[in-house]
Amino acid sequence: MNRKGITYKLFKITLLTFIFTITLILLVQGLFFKRFYVLTKERFIGKNLDIIQDTYGNYICSNYGSDVLFKYRVDKYEKSNDVYICVLGDNLKNIQFESPSFHAKFGKYGADDLKNKLKSNLKNPSILTPVGYPYISIKITSLGDVKTEFFVIVKSVSAPKGPHYLAVVHPLQPISEVMSISKEYYLIIYAIAIIIIISISFIYSKLISRPLLELNTVASKMSKLNFKTKCKIKSNDDELGALGNSLNFLSENLDTALTSLKLANEKLQQDIDKERELENMRKEFVADASHELKTPISLIKGYSEGIKDGIAKGNKQDNYLDIIIDECDKMNILVNEMLDLSKLEFGKIGLNIETFYLDYLIEKILNKHIDLIEQKNIILEIDILKNLLVFGDEFRIEGVITNFLTNAISYTSENHIIKITTYRFSNEIMVEFENEGEHIANEELSRIWEKFYRIEKSRDKKLGGTGLGLAICKNILSLHKSNFGVENTQTGVKFFFTLNISE
């Protein structure tokens, strides 16, 4: 048992209390048991002397029948109460009656010894009258031939020539013997009582300390921000039960507050991360845009200075002007695409969702690029579902299909194949553009959707556009909640996306 714990302290207090109590009880018993016995015996003997007192008067008158009755009652009374009876005359001067058992117990001079002891203890026997004190008890230490303690009940009885005194002697030897024997067992009784007290004290201290220890456990876990454990004290009508309920209430409130604080911190962290991401996007956007604009601006400046300095004349001047106009057009396209991408990324462009026929849109885009396809002798393999209505922003989806198709045309060599396929699964339609050509390196597949990213190793850089087309497509398809991507096939590269079907 922990000597510093509440259980030990309660156990110690309870044990000391019980030991003190049992010691006090045994001490009081030892001191007062004998006195209590004497008082009880005195009252019993004093109250029941009337049966002898009533027949004593007739005995004094020498009535034979009364004499026999008186001796019979005396004998019976002595045997029933373990007493010895003697009657003394006026003012305790002579002996009127001595029972055979009294004479046998105390000897020839027992009655005289009793008379002398009563005279020395009763200075005024006249107070013992039938209308005065009913009886008086006197303690003596020896009588006649017997050397032991006695108490004597003295009662006044009526006689023709004045009151006589009925003396009833009761020995204290039996109670002294009982007390002596009981003292021998006190140590055993005390030891048994101590064992019982220790057991009761331990059980009692455990019962009292258990809820306190449970409260301490819950409070300790709360200090470590663990609010899931609850106090299970069932008592609601005492201080411990009320404290347990208050602790549970506090735990629930703290748990709610902590959860709210965590959610607020998470949201704040998300906002901070988003802000950082936007800041990084802004920096990257400025850097990439500056890089993309640097070349056309340099070209425009160089050719403009050539015209100003008179270097270019005639047809050469016209060629310089064509280059300047062409670079201005490219810059205009780049700026417009950057603005569109910025609006898409910041959610400032909403979609005009409607139903339209996907096959009609694909055929319209193909017709716009048929001349370029025929110039490269590209073989088209088209397998698309007819008259199928889909949900989406037709204008934005047209831009996605145009980008995928022009990429496929740009990176397909002459006399090679471009496959355009659509097929349905569940409530969606999959659209695929696959071109024969070189594969894209796996480490570059995940970066192909980034702004201003171009593949320079496997494809000709001159064929690339602004580097924003696929980034714009990514944002448009994300707004449509489309599943899209790019992957290498056995013969080339395939771009794909999905749209919801309108039933």
Image (spheres, helix red, strand yellow):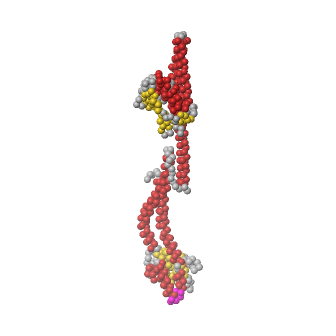
Q: Position of residue 292 (x, y in %)?
A: 51, 22
Q: Which of the two residues, 265 or 23, is positioned nearer the viewer here?
A: 265
Viewer-side residue, 176 vs 86: 176
**Residue drawn 45% across the image and 78% down it:** 144
Observer-nearest residue: 231 or 220?
A: 231
Residue sitting at the far front:
386
Q: Which of the 4 quarters of the picture holds residue 155?
A: bottom right
Q: Residue at coordinates 52% horizontally, 33% vertically from top-left? A: 358
- Camera sees residue 339: yes
- Residue 287 showing in the rendered view: no
Question: Residue drawn 46% across and 74% down?
Answer: 172
Task: Measuring from the top left, give residue 85's x and y in whole percent.
Answer: 49, 80
* Depth check, front residue: 98 or 52: 52
Residue 218 at what x, y percent from top left? 50, 49
* Magenta region: 58-65
Return the x and y of residue 7 as percentages of the image width and height: 47, 54
Q: Residue furthest bottom?
A: 64
Tell me which secondary structure the magenta stretch mostly adopts: helix
Residue 60, magenta (yes or no)? yes
Q: Is residue 13 above or below residue 160?
A: above
Based on the displayed image, in which of its 4 quarters is residue 129 positioned? Answer: bottom right
Q: Is residue 16 magenta?
A: no
